[in-house]
Image: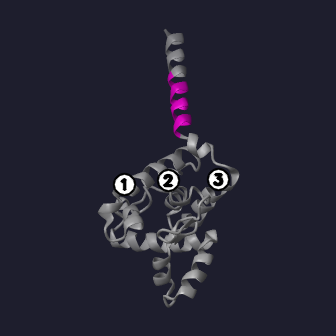
Amino acid sequence: MKHVLMTTLFVLALMAEQAVAKRCTELHSMNAKQINIMVQSYILGEKQDLGYTLSAIAWKESQAGSYPINISDPSFGVHHILITSAIKRSGLKDTSFNRNRLAAKLLEHKVSSMYAIQELKFWQRKYENDWIKVWASYNAGYSWQNGLKYANDIKQRIQLIKLCLIPKSKSKFESKGREM
């Protein structure tokens, strides 16, 4: 009986490990540069309790740095900061020259992260740490309802990052207001 129980536990553990591996496939297929972008985004956001969020946004918006420009928005950088939002947050006058200059700066990971953190902190204060609304507003502004699909995608990506890439420290993220 003990042998059957041990065999069953082993098989269940193996099945669970295979299920995790299947869920982690996309992250594990990233190249070294993409993994570095994900980890650096986490580190840059960690001090503000936004590490997982920044990493997930980098993954979602630019495929972890692979596509840092979206000319249709237009948005720039690892975290695809809208140029109009960056101009407002920077305090610069909205001129073609300043938009171009700021777009070039947003291609620097640290600059993109800084603006993403400012944007996320704004929505975090507005929605009192309701992360679904925060993530939705990062994508859709005040019309957060239009960003619910985006928010749920970010939530799933955070879960995968915690599971497959950057393990969650149990004691560090348990207080109210911190990332989910």
Residue at the image point whose x is 34% and y is 57% from the top: 148
Residue placed under numbered mark 1 in the picture: 149
Location of residue 73 in the rendering, given as x and y in whole percent from the top left corner: 47, 70
Q: Is residue 148 left or right of residue 6?
A: left
Is the residue under label 3 in contact with that under label 1 (CB below 8 Å)?
A: no
Residue placed under numbered mark 3 in the picture: 35
Q: Which residues are magenta?
A: 12-23
Residue placed under numbered mark 2 in the picture: 171
Crowding near the residue tagged with mark 1, few <14, some 14–19, many ≥20 C-alpha atoms within 10 Å: some
Task: Decide which of tag 3 and tag 2 comes sooner along the chain.
Answer: 3
Furthest toward the right, the residue is 32
Q: Is residue 133 left or right of residue 90?
A: left
Crowding near the residue tagged with mark 3, few <14, some 14–19, many ≥20 C-alpha atoms within 10 Å: some
Is the residue under label 2 in contact with that under label 3 (CB below 8 Å)?
A: no
Q: How far apart, in angstroms, are the residues tagged by discs 3 and 2?
A: 25 Å
Q: Label 2 sits on what residue type?
A: Ser
* Residue 32, placed above or below residue 121: above
Q: Label 3 sits on what residue type?
A: Ile
Furthest toward the top, the residue is 1
Q: Label 1 sits on what residue type?
A: Lys
Prevailing secondary structure class for the magenta stretch in the rendered image: helix
Of residues 156 and 179, which is closer to you in this image? 156
Mark 3 lies on a secondary structure that is helix
